[in-house]
Image (tube, rainbow, N blue to C red):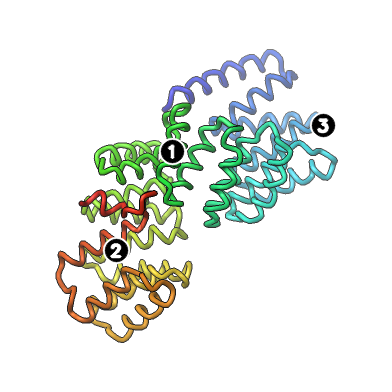
């Protein structure tokens, strides 16, 4: 157990003993609640709320604490009702609107959360960094990469939050601007050496710089600290795939998809991994899942075309090739599917080379393929 958790639990026990001697002390109760919430001791937190409620002494702070406990328990509707009740009573603390936005974000309602957060930035609230970080996540989840980059650049010199800088570094990775990603990730890690998003960003950058061992070290560190983070697992899967450790890659992609099943890039990674393992039915299913999420992504159609070509289904492969090239005339996977059908690329070596090029479609600021750099 982390040292900070042990310290918090020890302090919680001490405060409970103090409360036995001063049962009506609301300051002690509020401290107990806050510590109980931070350590996941929700029953102890609830006891404080029950006592305050029985004495009809609920005020803004205790009602807000009730909302926080609902959030911790993922009781989203109760949290929303409690927060909105405070707002309807005339309370306008920005933290209420931030927490309402967080509830929407946690439920995947990113556009609604975005709408609730944007007015907060103009108000310059005390939790500006938190509001900015959550808004960046909303934009990122919606694929609004350019908007997120512009937003963070606007506030970059006004905040010092490692969390915000870490999130921004991952967004910069997805915008293929590795130099900015490195700058923001380093700034995050200078303040918080364990910051998750920045660690994953630096792992991705290490791959682009041919430093595979550093990439694995960073990504494994992030995975150990955050075993349920889909982005970490997906990036780790890509590292294993580029190192041609296909068993580990398949496992990492599969784990990642448990936590972010709507991430198209991870489905692509799994699809190519299973193709390279010659598990064509699993590869087919992966690209079909990607198409269910977005039928206008050329590489999904192209990847499926390669699978169909390898399965010998020429008619369906041609249909998928046409769809891919209609969306992107330079779609590399569709071109390779054409080569497979014509017999020009029917050997394992050329297939592996193409797979690595496809998977390296993310490019550095100089336009060089990530996979080409790592595997050159």
Residue 97, compared with residue 13, is above or below; it is below
Outermost residue toward the front in this view: 366
**Sequence-first tag of 3 and 1:** 3
Q: Is residue 203 left or right of residue 275?
A: right
- The residue lying at 24 percent from left, 78 percent from top is 311
Query: Of 186 and 114, which appears nearest the observer?
Result: 186
User: Between tags 2 and 3, which lies in front?
Assistant: 2
Where residue 105 sits in the image (x, y, percent)? 60, 50
Where residue 94 sits in the image (x, y, percent)? 73, 38
Label 3 – label 1 distance at C-alpha: 46 Å
The answer to whether mark 3 and mark 1 are in CB contact below 8 A is no
Label 2 – label 3 distance at C-alpha: 61 Å
Question: Where does label 2 land, which residue?
Answer: 272
Question: Where does label 3 land, which residue?
Answer: 56
- The residue lying at 36 percent from left, 79 percent from top is 320
Label 2 – label 1 distance at C-alpha: 27 Å
For residue 278, what is the image quadrant?
bottom left
Outermost residue toward the bottom in this view: 315
Label 2: few (<14), some (14–19) or many (≥20) C-alpha neighbours in 10 Å = many
Residue 230: tell me if it is visible: no
Question: Where does label 1 land, which residue?
Answer: 198
Outermost residue toward the right in this view: 90
- The residue lying at 60 percent from left, 46 percent from top is 135
Query: Of 7 and 296, which appears nearest the observer?
Result: 296
The residue tagged with tag 3: helix, strand or loop?
A: loop
**Sequence-first tag of 2 and 1:** 1
Q: Is residue 236 left or right of residue 41?
A: left
User: Between tags 2 and 1, which lies in front?
Assistant: 1
């Amino acid at each position: 157990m982390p040292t900070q958790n042990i310290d918090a639990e020890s302090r919680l026990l001490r405060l409970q003993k103090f409360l036995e001697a001063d049962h009506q002390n609301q300051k002690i109760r509020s401290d107990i609640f806050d510590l109980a919430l931070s350590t996941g001791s929700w029953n102890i937190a609830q006891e404080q709320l029950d006592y305050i409620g029985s004495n009809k002494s609920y005020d803004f702070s205790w009602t807000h604490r009730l909302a926080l406990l609902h959030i911790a328990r993922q009781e989203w509707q109760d949290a929303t009702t409690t927060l909105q009740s405070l707002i309807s009573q005339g309370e306008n603390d920005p933290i209420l609107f931030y927490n309402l936005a967080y509830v929407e974000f946690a439920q995947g309602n990113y556009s609604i959360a975005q709408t609730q957060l944007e007015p907060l930035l103009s108000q310059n609230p005390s939790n500006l960094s938190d509001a900015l970080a959550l808004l960046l996540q909303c934009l990122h989840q919606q694929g609004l990469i350019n908007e997120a980059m512009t937003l963070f650049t606007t506030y970059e010199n006004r905040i010092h939050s490692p969390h915000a800088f870490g999130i921004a570094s991952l967004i910069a990775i997805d915008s293929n601007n590795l130099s900015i990603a490195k700058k923001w990730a380093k700034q995050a890690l200078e303040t918080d050496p364990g910051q998750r998003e920045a660690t994953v960003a630096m792992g991705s950058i290490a791959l682009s710089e041919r430093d595979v061992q550093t990439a694995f070290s960073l990504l494994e560190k992030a995975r150990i600290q955050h075993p349920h983070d889909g982005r970490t697992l997906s990036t780790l899967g890509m590292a294993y795939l580029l190192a041609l450790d296909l068993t580990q890659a398949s496992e990492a992609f599969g784990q990642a998809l448990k936590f972010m099943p709507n991430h198209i890039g991870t489905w692509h990674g799994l699809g190519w991994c299973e193709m390279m393992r010659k598990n064509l039915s699993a590869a087919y299913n992966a690209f079909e899942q990607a198409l269910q999420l977005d039928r206008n992504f050329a590489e999904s159609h192209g990847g499926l075309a390669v699978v169909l070509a390898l399965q010998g289904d020429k008619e369906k492969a041609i249909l998928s090739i046409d769809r891919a090239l209609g969306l992107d005339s330079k779609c590399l996977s569709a071109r390779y599917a054409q080569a497979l059908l014509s017999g020009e690329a029917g050997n394992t070596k050329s297939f592996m080379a193409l797979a690595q090029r496809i998977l390296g479609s993310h490019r550095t600021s100089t336009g060089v393929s990530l996979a080409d750099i790592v595997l050159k």
